[in-house]
Amino acid sequence: MFKLIILLIFVIVAGACSSTKHVIIEDTNGHQDIISDTTEEDGEQILPPEAYYNFLAGFLHEQSGELKEALKNYEQALSHDRNSLFLLSRVAALQAKLGQLNKAVETMNKLIEIAPRPVPAIFLLAEIYFNLGDHEKSVETYDRLLSLDAGNVRAYLNRGIALLNLKRHDEAIASIQKGIDLNPENPVGYTYLGNAYFDKGDLKKARKNYHKAISKRSNYEPAYLKIAATYIKEENFEMAKDTYKNILKNINPFSHEALFQLTQIYVQMKEYDKAVDLLENAFIQNPRDLDILFRLALIYKETKDYQKAIDKLKILVAVRPRDMRLHEYLGYLYEETKDVDKARKEYEYIISLDPENIDAHLHLGYLYARKEEEEKAISILKKAITIDPKRPNSYYMIGIIYSQGGDYKKAKEIYLTGIEAVPDDPELHFNLGIVYDKLERFEDMVSEMRKTIEIDPDHENALNYLGYSFADKGINLDEAISLVERALKIKPDNGAYVDSLGWAYYKKGLIDLAIQHLKRASELMPDDPVIMEHLGDVYINMNMKAEAREEWLKSLEMNIENKKLIEKFKETGFGDPEMEDRLKDKLEEYNKKKLEDSEDLPKEDVPPR
């Protein structure tokens, strides 16, 4: 019986040796590595039965694609025969496939030491170094190989790609050209040479070599794809589209790269209908290709056709129920459609799969805050802080919840805690400055705004906030104007910033400039009550009472709860604004809008203007 088992194993090994297979892995540069699945071994040795069992089990697992189990069995078999060239080669190959590249290097070095013909092992070692990103070692190893086998075409080509990754373009081109000289009929060499010129920035020579590759093999898809890439680099999107269409029509109708690159061009050019039609037709031809369905969902999300995006994602979730990426997108889409309960379920499910998923905690906390379940929201967000105390978003959101509830002291404390963890985050200092303003700690507010600007000189909100705050108090007016002007250089059409500048000019007594800027601000933000109130204030200063009354009434139409303006309206002798018919009509609308807006938690407190 034991002899029969040995014979069976011999037949399997002989069959495997009679047809050497290769695993080819190609990266974005077109680099390919070849892992030989067999290494010839001399001599015979009688081993314990468990050695043969583990080899046979490993072989069967590998044939079934169960690589982790195969590696475990091969390693157990290797423990009985530590110098088996075949087992060492299999262990190294599987370690490389499974991403255990450092272990694969150790295994290959041992194999090279004892192998009578080490060229295949050296080749594999060079590939492993390449995949580790150690391109210097990869080049050195190819040089070692070529000293033993000067006619190895693949070694010259792959050596060239390793040199290309080191940006040693001329050496890369020379190495690849040597490989081409040894085998001028191989399209791979010309494609690699095209890649070298592409990386060097010589797109014409790159395209010339890709066409040479096609002349050697008319249906060689990688060369067509790279030709399209040169057109994209040149922003010649029409030629790129034509090339991808040609691939899908005449070369490979199931080419993922051509399909998705063509889709991306359509999306970039806002031709969403064409992108959708392309993917829908591709999915009809290949309904098992779920990546197409996912791309469709992303396009529907991009075009804000949220229900269609949700429908596509739900199909994917039915097939891949534990794919967290799908649940993240669904959660986002339910948020956008204001289906808070479904969104919460998605994020809760993600947390059940990955309790340390901080993004899911942040979204979930936000959703509970929208439902005015503040304690639950804060509890979840504090959990996010324990997961990653250096993630500032958690502190922002807790601070906003406290601020909206009027608890500015707690908001201050959470921002201070956040600053201890992330001292150079500008938003934490900015939000703390706002809280100090609410607490009427003006100097502390100024200090935090200055700190924000020190960290981020282009923080337009802080520039505007501080500039407006100075203007509103009538102090540091030259600095106030300078600060707001800096904000406007970043966003010249921001109505709030234009209003701040107009208000600073008014406080400085530059009335004509003030009116000019406030009118422009009103054009940019025609429904903003603050701008209307400011215009009214300037008109009163100019004794233009009719104009002032009109601007104040328009402001109150937008914000009927502005008690200070109501009193100012009365004191100026304009009567009781709440008795105006136009305000009575707007009061109900305003309250309704306020109720709707209360469902949304803003990302940051609103700065004064």
Image (tube, rainbow, N blue to C red):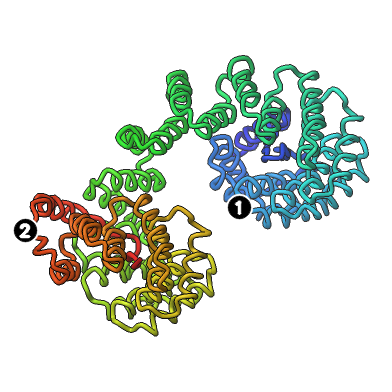
Q: Quadrant of the N terminus?
A: top right
Judge by depth and name the residue closer to the eye, 47 or 415: 415
Q: Would residue 183 be found to the left or right of residue 483 on screen?
A: right
Q: Is residue 319 visible?
A: no
Judge by depth and name the residue closer to the eye, 249 or 518: 518
Report the label total. 2
Image location (x, y in percent) of residue 525: 34, 52
> Amino acid under label 2?
Met
Q: Nearer the viewer, mark 1 or mark 2?
A: 2
Quadrant in the rendering for residue 503: bottom left
Give residue 76's mark: 1
- Counting residues from the start of the chain, the first of labels 1 and 2 encountered is 1
Residue 540, compared with residue 281, is above or below; it is below
Image location (x, y in percent) of residue 91: 66, 48
Q: Secondary structure at mark 2?
A: helix
> Amino acid under label 1?
Gln
Residue occupying the point 9% across, 64% down = 575
Residue occupying the point 38% across, 79% down = 445
Q: Secondary structure at mark 1?
A: helix
10 Å crowding of disc 2: few (<14), some (14-19), many (20+): few
Dots 1 and 2: beta carbons under 8 Å?
A: no
